[in-house]
Amino acid sequence: MNVETKISAVRAPQQGRSRASFERMLIAAEELMSERGTDDFTLNEVGKRGKVSIGSIYCRFDSKDDLVHAVQTRVLERVNAEQLAMVESARTEASDLVILVDRLVEGTAESLRRFADVTRPFMIRASTDTVVAAQGKARYAEIADAVCAALLEHSAEIAQPDAERAVHSAYRILYSSIARYLGFGSTMGSAWDGDWQILKEDLARMIAAFLTTSPRIA
């Protein structure tokens, strides 16, 4: 079963009262994951916090896995909407490549940090859940493409011989560095405990230098 089929299997309600109950289920599950940093919760806990019955939950979801997948969709829609808006703002306001890089690094880092508590559980779960992994990969690609397209609008300022390769490498470095700091894909114990502002500043400088410097010919 592909991701689209799996997600669409959720029985979303049509009536107002049922929609409100459905929303409380999603909010309750999201809050529990955010607080605990994992998907270690029970449907009974969701029902208690969301003030809905277990029967109501099973009317909408066949399993806890289906609920987790629906919550991930909800979260990633918010994350991507914010990041796409950030990219568009940076693209229209930056007058040159260096300024654009600085805006994109700052915006990406702060957006990922704001959503870290609720996205971290999905990063951990992705290693064993193909639906979560596929959703995350698709959403990552959407943002990566937007960031790279914005950078390539300044291709005349990019000194690397393959501008497209360079901007994609730059985004991978940016994302992986921020993800490491925030403890994505692992426990918080493995997150970097360095200075957040220094990390952002140095990433912006390194990426700008990489893009605007011609490689040395041996």
Image (spheres, rainbow, N blue to C red):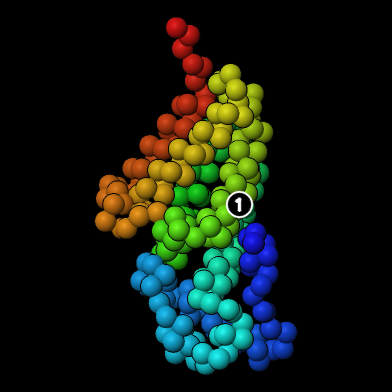
Q: Quadrant of the N terminus?
A: bottom right
Q: Is 171 placed above or below 118 here?
A: above
Residue tagged 1: 138
Residue 105 x %, y %: 48, 43
Work out whether residue 125 or residue 140 is closer to the camera in this orientation and state it.
125
At 58% from the left and 44% from the top, the residue drawn is 144
On the image, which quarter does residue 198 sit in?
A: top left
Q: Given the current orientation, which residue lies at the most extreme right position?
A: 14
Q: From this viewpoint, which residue is outermost toward the front?
A: 1
Q: Secondary structure at mark 1?
A: helix
Q: Position of residue 26 (x, y in %)?
A: 54, 77
Residue 10, x across and y down, in percent = 64, 75
Q: Tally the numbered discs.
A: 1
Expressed as whole percent of the image width and height from the top left, the position of residue 200 reads 40, 43
Give above or below for 113 relative to 211: below
Q: 161 left or right of 191?
A: right
- Residue at 46% from the left image edge and 12% from the top image edge: 216
Does residue 87 appear in the picture of this structure? no
Against 103, is 21 above or below? below
**Which residue corresponds to the image point at 64% horizontal and 27% vertical from the top-left?**
155
Label 1 Cα crowd, 10 Å radius (few <14 / some 14-19 / many 20+): few
| Disc 1 residue type (three-letter) | Ala
Residue placed most toward the observer, 60 or 76:
60
From the image, which quarter does the C terminus lie in? Answer: top left
Q: Quadrant of residue 136?
A: bottom right
Residue depicted at 58% across the width and 18% down the height: 161
Regarding residue 44, the answer to whether it shows in the image is: yes
Depth check, front residue: 104 or 6: 6
